[in-house]
Every structure is written in structure tokens, then in C-alpha cells.
Amino acid sequence: MKNSVDPHLSEEKSNQANHRSKGLIEIHGKPFLYYLINNASKAGFENIYIITGEDASQFRSALSNQTDLKTLDIQFATQYIPSERVKPYGTADAVYQCLEQYPELKNKTFCVCNSDNLYTTQAFELLKKAPSNQAILAYDIDALEYPIEKISRFAVMKFNEQYDLLDIIEKPDPSVISNYTDASGKTRVSMNIFLFDGNIFFDYLKNCPPHSERNEKELPTALKNMIKDGKVVLGIPIATHVPDLTAKGDITILEQYLDQN
């Protein structure tokens, strides 16, 4: 976000993109995170956990001003950085620290998603009503309004006939993406939105090894280790676009998307 350039963006929006967390960049006068939480709320979620760095003051302030979110129970978890590191230890570590700070989640099912993707209300509803305690949304790449070069940075998935997740392959070569198809001939990718059973998943978060190159404990690694042990994660097909905030140019695209939806 900070390294990208959009000459058509206002000075105010460029300044926000350079100095705020992406979830706090304002879209039509509200922080991006507002729209994400609002969609989860419309799907029936009532308890929201936001994982931040050690200073959550900007997040607390931005969300406290959104009166229509007052009915939700919004809690903040902190991802502390180990003393021997200068950067956070990855997404699996973030969720692990959240469960340590809110141990009731270890015995509940909960949804996990990115804070810079705008998932639809339908997406949240599919997970909330899933016929399994653990699930992953399987997005049809034909519905994603992204070039293949960007889609190749996502993770493609393999499923069995019951649509249980068998494998998740991160950043496949673009030339072989079409080889990963389900029974209907569709290629499915993960957009990092999951349903987990804390009673099952906690140990895999706790024992997640760091990635060999990025040296971070990542959710897909914990997920893969869990399915290797025979734990079931149901794939739920979905065909819809997921707008995101990756670069400054996405701010205008998101504004247009919200105008149309």
C-alpha cells in the first residue's frame, strides 16, 4: 500500500494510505473495517475479535464512532512481538495469541478472515450456517475480478468427492492453475476466510512451525498440518468477487464497488 502510487487519489486519501493501517483507511467517510464488520453483523455474527499490534488506540477510536455497530461485542486481542524479533510472527501466531487472551474460544467455533478483504454478507452466512465445525470458502476464480497474475498469488485447493479439503497449494505457477479443478471443473482458491473449531485447531496453532523462507507461522501451514492428521475441513463453493485493499488504486475501486452494491 505505502509503496504504490495512484496519481488520481486525493492528497488526504494518499496520506491515509501512507500512515494508517489498511483497515482504517476511509471509504466514503467510514473506515474500511466498518464495512467488513457490518457484513459479518448482517450475517448474524455478534462477537467480533480484532487482532492488532500493541497499540490498538486508532482502531478503538475509529470503531467507537460507528453508532450502528454498538450492538456488537467488539473485543481487541494483541499480537505481541517476541523479544528476538522485529516483526510479528505471522497469522497463525496472531490467532494463537487471540485464543490465549480469550480462552473461551478454545471451546467454540469461530470465523477467521483478513481485515483488508471485503467479504460479502453471503460469505459470512455460508460459514455461520456450515454443516461442519470447520470449513473454508472455495472461491471460483472465474468470479474474481483479478488478472491471473494476481490470482496466482492466492492459494489453490484440492477436494475429495465429499468436498473435504485435501490440500492447499500456495502461489502456484500461473501456467498450472487450470490443472487444479474440482468435480464441476472449477478452479477454487482461498481468500483467507475460514471456520475453525477451537477445540481441534488450537494445538495446530500452538505448534505451527515457521515457514522455511518467510520465517513466519502462517495459518495455511497450521491448516495443512491439521488435514494431514485426518481432521476434516469442509470446502464450501462460492462464486463472487472479493474486493481488497492491496494498493492505493484499490481505494477508488472499492468506492465504486460500494456505490454499486
Image: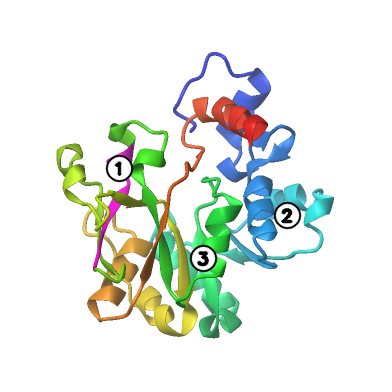
Q: Residue at x 45, y 76 (%)?
A: 132
Q: Is residue 124 above or below residue 179?
A: below
Q: Is residue 100 above or below residue 220?
A: below
Q: Which residue is mark 3?
A: 127
Foreground disc of the pair 3, 2: 3
Crowding at mark 1 (Cα within 10 Å: few <14, some 14-19, many 20+): some
Nearest to the observer: residue 97 or residue 259: 259
How far apart marks 3 and 1 lie (CA) works out to 24 Å
Q: Residue type at mark 1?
A: Arg
Foreground disc of the pair 1, 2: 1
Q: Which residues are magenta?
A: 151-160
Q: Position of residue 4 (x, y in %)?
A: 45, 26
Which quarter shows the C terminus? Answer: top right
Query: Element at badge 1?
Result: loop
Q: How is the image coloured?
A: rainbow
Q: Residue type at mark 2?
A: Arg
Q: Is residue 207 above or below residue 166?
A: below
Q: Residue at x 25, y 56 (%)?
A: 182
Q: Residue type at mark 3?
A: Leu
